[in-house]
Image (spheres, rainbow, N blue to C red):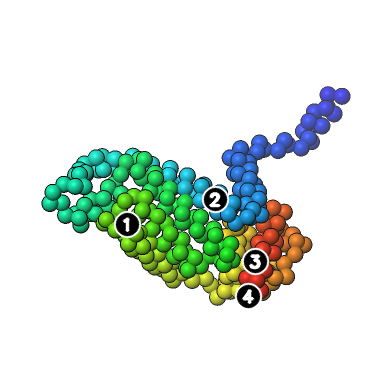
Amino acid sequence: MEGKQGTAAVLAPPSPPPANPVAQLQARVKELEIGFRAWLAKQPTAMEAAIVTATSAAQGAFIGALMGSLTSDASSAIPTPPSNAPGLNPEAMASLKQAQAFAGGPLVQARNFAVMTGTNAGISCVMRRIRGVEDMQSSMVAAFGSGALFSLVSGMGGPNQALNAVTSGLFFALVQGGLFKIGEKFSQPPADDVLYSSTKRMLTSLGLQNYEKNFKKGLLSDATLPLLTDSALRDVNIPPGPRLLILDHIQRNSEVVKRW
């Protein structure tokens, strides 16, 4: 009897290794992110833009406060003369305000970064909903808005705030356009990737770029986007949540998909 029990104990399958808690947490966070994106994509444009603006502004405020805490000593070293001081050069006063805008304390930098990132994300969201694509024009429009509002909030520049806001917006837009072109130049896709350029843009806008290889494996190129079905996406092993996001995006942007 003891021999049989010992044999059974030896033949028993080994217990599975304990699950990695970090991997489980990452999978859970990714699942929540996909669910949130699916819910957000179904909301009206105004609500989506408001939520995106608020979350991006919160992230920008955190980064700005962190940077401001590192530059607080520099900002305290910059004197602030009264604006009505006799003999004060307006151009010098404008330069002083510009230096203070970029070297303020945690609260100042948190405000500035929140305005820049929140405005940029909100305008980008609206442009994507209206135009159906994310390209250089949309990026430049968002950069112009964030630059103009940053100028107004920070008080940077001369006494003509409206003119300075337009100038700052144009500067931000030109810089963004230049960076966009440089990024395109140094990230030229391989020849076969040209067939999946629109697919890649769609997946990136949905935060699903990890499934680009699934599309390529199933030969689901740009030409097949208007024909995609749930079963076709399931055949290339795309989970239910991302499938819903992709099909909803194609349905809401049917005119854009037809141009692809």
- Three-letter residue code for mark 4: Arg
* Residue 193 vertical position relative to residue 230 in the rendered view, above or below: below
Question: Dot 1: few (<14), some (14–19), or many (≥20) neighbours within 10 Å?
Answer: some
Is there CB contact under 8 Å for labels 3 and 2? no
Is residue 70 placed above or below 162 in the rendered structure?
above
- The image quadrant of residue 140 is bottom left
Any part of residue 28 in sight: yes
Q: Amino acid at mark 2?
A: Ala
Q: CA distance from mark 3 to mark 1?
A: 39 Å
Q: Secondary structure at mark 3?
A: loop
- Determine which residue is flagged by label 2: 50
For the residues labelled 4 and 3, the Cα–Cα distance comes to: 10 Å
Q: How many marks?
A: 4
Residue 259 is tagged as: 4
Alpha carbon of mark 4 to alpha carbon of mark 2: how far? 29 Å
Q: Which residue is mark 3?
A: 253
If you read the primary sequence from the N terminus, does the residue marked by circle 3 or circle 2 appear first?
2
Closer to us: 99 or 83: 83
Q: Is residue 214 left or right of residue 180?
A: right
Q: Relative to 140, does residue 42 appear above or below in the rendering?
A: above
Residue beneath the point at 83% across and 27% down: 5
Q: Nearer the viewer, mark 4 or mark 2?
A: 2
Please name the amino acid that badge 1 sits on: Gln
Place of residue 144 in the rendered image (x, y in percent of width and height, measured from the top left): 41, 62
Tell me: residue 176, above or below residue 5: below
The residue pinned by badge 1 equals: 161
Q: Amino acid at mark 3?
A: Asn
**Residue at 47% from the left image edge and 51% from the top image edge:** 118
Foreground mark, 3 or 2, reads 2
Most distant residue in the top direction: 2
